[in-house]
Image (cartoon, rainbow, N blue to C red):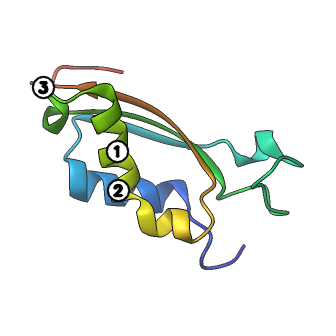
Amino acid sequence: MSANVPTAANLEQRLRERLQPVTLQVIDESYQHAGHVGANDSGVGTHFRVKIASPLFTGVSRVARHRLVYDSLQDFIDQGLHALAIEAEASPSGNTQI
């Protein structure tokens, strides 16, 4: 795997730094997209699912929540991250679960 291929751990670290989530799951689903547009030969680092709950999303529209996630991960998109499935929820307290 190339050093420039995004990993779930890289994305998780960045999202924790930028969006201060209460809950966060980053799942690499690249292997499910073999042969599809944007997939690479390694089967990793191109297609991710992000499940995130953050107090920073309170009062923010769904589109704006997704934009915050995309903006936080832009350099990974530039490195080959092709697709993100995002489930972003507001979390006013530490008790919200996704």
Question: Between disc 3 and disc 1, whose residue precedes?
Answer: 3
Q: What label sits on residue 59 in the rendered view?
A: 3
What residue type is disc 2 on?
Asp
Give how far across and how far down residue 30 sits, in percent.
71, 48
How would you rate the neighbour count of disc 1 (Cα within 10 Å): few for under 14, some for 14-19, many for 20 or more?
Answer: few
How would you rate the neighbour count of disc 3 (Cα within 10 Å): few for under 14, some for 14-19, many for 20 or more?
Answer: few
Outermost residue, right direction?
35
The quarter of the rendered structure image containing the N terminus is bottom right
Residue matched to label 1: 67
Numbered label tally? 3
Outermost residue, bottom direction?
3
What residue type is disc 3 on?
Gly
Give how far across and how far down residue 16 sits, in percent.
27, 52
Give the structural element (helix, strand or loop) at label 3: loop
Say which residue appears at 43% left-offset and 63% top-offset.
74
Say which residue appears at 23% left-offset and 40% top-offset.
21
Q: Is residue 1 left or right of residue 95?
A: right
* Whole-number angstrom distance, CA of label 1 to CA of label 2: 6 Å
